[in-house]
């Protein structure tokens, strides 16, 4: 009889089971219409639970579903998660569905790639990566991922935001952090419709946030930092343990003390090396000359190689090791330089910086957002900054890789947050000085010197590191002129506290000026013409930012051909705007035309309503940069 009841159960519920098996999951048709606008992918559902078990253990579990709508969003469906000896990934699952929500396949363990993440500039890293490529070529499709990750330190607690790349919408996102009642976290919310919800559950605190129906952002020109408009939460641990070291992020002073503890005992330099450096110094040198001599010794002796090992890639290896091997990463080379300077009586400091593109900085929220190390030497009436990884960079120079941002000086007494120098518009300058010999046929011979200062010096510095063939190719590519031939060139890096870079060029242009009847039209600003104008926007979403002050100065002298005389010159122009200043003028003297142009662009953050005014300013500049002199054949 039991057997008959068993069969009866199967018969009764078989239709339900078959229906459930075929029920679609995440069909594209269920995505709200407003989320499809401008989207190449949609995060359908993302759920993250981060549990702080103790200051030396975190459990991170996440499930997320992404629908790729078109080919431009396919890379967003890749699963790529890193791990190292302080963390591990487990329970990875991935299921692929078609646009109607029908299951295509489940990714097997054999299809999950596991490889080292050694980058092209690294000698060694102990980081590895788990990678899944759905390998789908028909759109749309959906991938459902889930995985768990464990960390051996609460140091790795991080926040979240809604930005998954431009043209990616978010349908639903839930984030929860769980932690002991006797523990504390720091967090800061921004641009959320509702604050996080905190409650006590089963003897622990749970703090959770939710987000829904966030439309796909579109990349806009001169957009301000994401933190000024993207919803999210910054999170940092109050205390943590990392490989036997203890620290906390209660203040910048506390974080600096933790970093100092990682470096303790790593400053020994052999006596033989100290004697070599001492022999390079003399009493006639001032402080800058002595510091420069010590810096140049380190730069000349050692080379940069990235080595991402040790305590989460945070701890330098010993100065003695750098001295013996003559290489190191930014941590090791900065520690070595600081150790040398300290031996010779200078209070030099190992300094944490977020290098590269400038990022949003919130000094009120303590967190480790740094990715690079430099050195700082405060003097009584001066401060000398040292980039220790590039042997071509002069002592005291920081380029746009590390300028104008908050950095953390690591001291025994604790961290000190200070700001690196910024370049004024006058310092951050490109100038053009040219002599142009115009031929009667409209051809031109041009002798020009382009000079770069401030952050622009560092942008040009790679030219001196190239071989002749690559250098010539890069110079030719940088010249925005039609129909020219580069006859000769020379590059000179003037290394000084405030360095400059000269690019000297000799060009011939067979079709420089144009003829209309007996008249010749001679362009007055060929070398530095502003011809790129971003489009106007009727519905801009994000505030606007100009990240740096900048200026240009151009002086060109045109020798007109025999048999021609000047008929007309453009009128002098002056444009004044809150975004900057533009001036151009020309005059005729001694058979030559003298053209002068100046441009200043002002750094600043501007409301989105100002964007079209900025475009209009750029449009006017481009119009006046087309200025031409009119020559006519003499009688």
Image (spheres, rainbow, N blue to C red):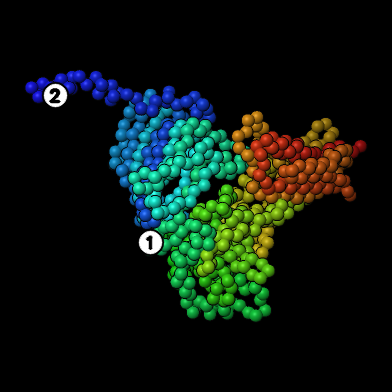
- Which is more toward the observer, 611 or 77? 611
Tag 2 or tag 1, which sits nearer the N-term?
A: 2
Quarter occupied by the C terminus: top right
Q: Residue at x 52, y 54 (%)?
A: 366
CA gap between label 1 and label 2 equals 57 Å
- In the image, residue 2 sits, relative to residue 59, either above or below, namely above
Q: Pinpoint residue 627: horizontal percent, then vertical percent.
A: 79, 39
In the rendered image, residue 524, in percent from the top left (x then y), is placed at 78, 42
Looking at the image, residue 575 sits to the left or right of residue 187; the answer is: right
**Vertical relation: 38 (above or below) 181:** above
Q: Residue 504, percent across and down?
A: 70, 54
Q: Give the residue at mark 2.
A: 6
**Quarter of the rendering containing residue 405:** bottom right
Which secondary structure lies at badge 1? loop
Residue drawn at the location 69% of the way across and 50% of the way down: 549
Judged left or right of residue 356, residue 178 is left
Q: Residue at x 86, y 44 (%)?
A: 562
Q: How many marks?
A: 2
Above or below — where is 41 with respect to 553? above
Residue at the location (65% across, 58% down)? 421
- Which is nearer the eye, 25 or 300? 25
Asked if residue 72 shows in the view, the reply is: no
**Label 2 CA crowd tier, 10 Å (few <14, some 14–19, many 20+):** few
Q: Secondary structure at mark 2?
A: helix
Label 1–label 2 contact, CB within 8 A: no
């Amino acid at each position: 009889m039991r057997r008959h009841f068993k069969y009866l159960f199967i018969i009764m519920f078989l239709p339900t089971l078959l229906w459930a098996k075929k029920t679609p999951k995440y069909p594209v048709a269920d995505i709200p219409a407003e989320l499809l606008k401008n989207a190449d992918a949609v995060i359908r559902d993302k759920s993250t639970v981060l549990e702080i078990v103790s200051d030396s253990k975190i459990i991170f579990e996440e499930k997320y579903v992404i629908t790729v709508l078109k080919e431009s969003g396919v890379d967003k469906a890749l699963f790529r998660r890193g791990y190292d000896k302080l963390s591990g990934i487990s329970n990875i699952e991935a299921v692929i569905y078609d646009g109607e929500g029908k299951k295509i396949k489940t990714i097997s363990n054999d299809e999950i790639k596991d490889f080292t993440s050694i980058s092209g500039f690294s000698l060694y890293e102990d980081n590895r990566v788990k990678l899944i490529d759905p390998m789908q070529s028909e759109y749309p499709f959906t991938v459902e991922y889930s995985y768990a990750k464990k960390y051996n330190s609460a140091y790795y607690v991080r926040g979240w935001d809604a930005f998954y790349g431009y043209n990616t919408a978010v349908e639903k996102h839930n984030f929860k952090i769980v932690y002991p009642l006797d523990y504390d976290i720091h967090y800061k919310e921004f641009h959320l419709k509702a604050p996080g919800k905190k409650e006590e559950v089963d003897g622990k605190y749970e703090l959770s946030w939710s987000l829904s129906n966030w439309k796909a952002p579109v990349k806009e020109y001169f957009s301000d930092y994401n933190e000024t408009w993207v919803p999210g939460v910054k999170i940092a641990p109050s205390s943590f343990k990392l490989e036997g070291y203890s620290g906390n992020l209660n203040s910048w002073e506390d974080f600096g003390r933790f970093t100092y503890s990682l470096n303790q005992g790593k400053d020994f330099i052999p006596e033989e090396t100290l004697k070599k450096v001492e022999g390079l110094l003399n009493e006639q040198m001032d402080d800058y000359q002595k510091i420069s001599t010590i810096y140049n010794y380190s730069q000349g002796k050692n080379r940069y190689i990235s080595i991402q090992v040790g305590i989460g890639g945070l701890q330098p290896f010993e100065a003695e090791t750098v001295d013996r091997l003559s290489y190191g990463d930014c941590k090791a080379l900065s520690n070595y330089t600081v150790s040398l300077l300290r031996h010779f009586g200078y209070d030099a400091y190992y300094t944490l910086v977020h290098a590269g593109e400038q990022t949003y900085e919130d000094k009120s929220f303590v967190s480790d957002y740094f990715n690079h190390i430099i050195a700082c030497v405060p003097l009584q009436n001066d401060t000398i900054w040292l980039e220790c990884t590039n042997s071509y960079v002069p002592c005291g120079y920081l380029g746009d890789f590390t300028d104008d941002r908050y950095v953390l000086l690591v001291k025994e007494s604790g961290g000190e947050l200070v700001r690196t120098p910024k370049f004024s518009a006058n310092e951050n300058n490109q100038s053009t000085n040219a002599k142009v010999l115009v031929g009667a046929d409209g051809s031109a011979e041009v002798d020009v010197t382009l000079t770069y200062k401030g952050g622009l010096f560092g942008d040009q510095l790679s030219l001196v590191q190239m071989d002749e063939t690559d250098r010539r190719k890069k110079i030719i590519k940088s010249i925005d002129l039609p129909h020219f031939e580069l006859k000769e060139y020379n590059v000179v890096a003037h290394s000084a506290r405030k360095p400059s870079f000269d690019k000297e060029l000799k060009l011939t242009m067979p079709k420089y000026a144009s003829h209309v009847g007996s008249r010749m039209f001679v362009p007055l600003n060929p070398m530095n013409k502003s011809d790129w104008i971003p489009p106007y926007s009727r519905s801009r979403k994000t505030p606007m930012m100009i990240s740096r002050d900048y200026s240009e100065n151009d002086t060109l002298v045109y020798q007109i051909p025999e048999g021609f005389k000047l008929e007309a010159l453009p009128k002098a122009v002056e444009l004044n705007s809150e975004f900057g200043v533009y001036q151009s003028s020309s005059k005729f003297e001694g058979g030559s035309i003298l053209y002068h142009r100046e441009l200043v662009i002002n750094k600043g953050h501007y409301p989105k309503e100002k964007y079209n005014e900025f475009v209009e300013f750029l449009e006017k500049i481009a119009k006046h940069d087309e200025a031409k002199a009119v020559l006519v054949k003499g009688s």
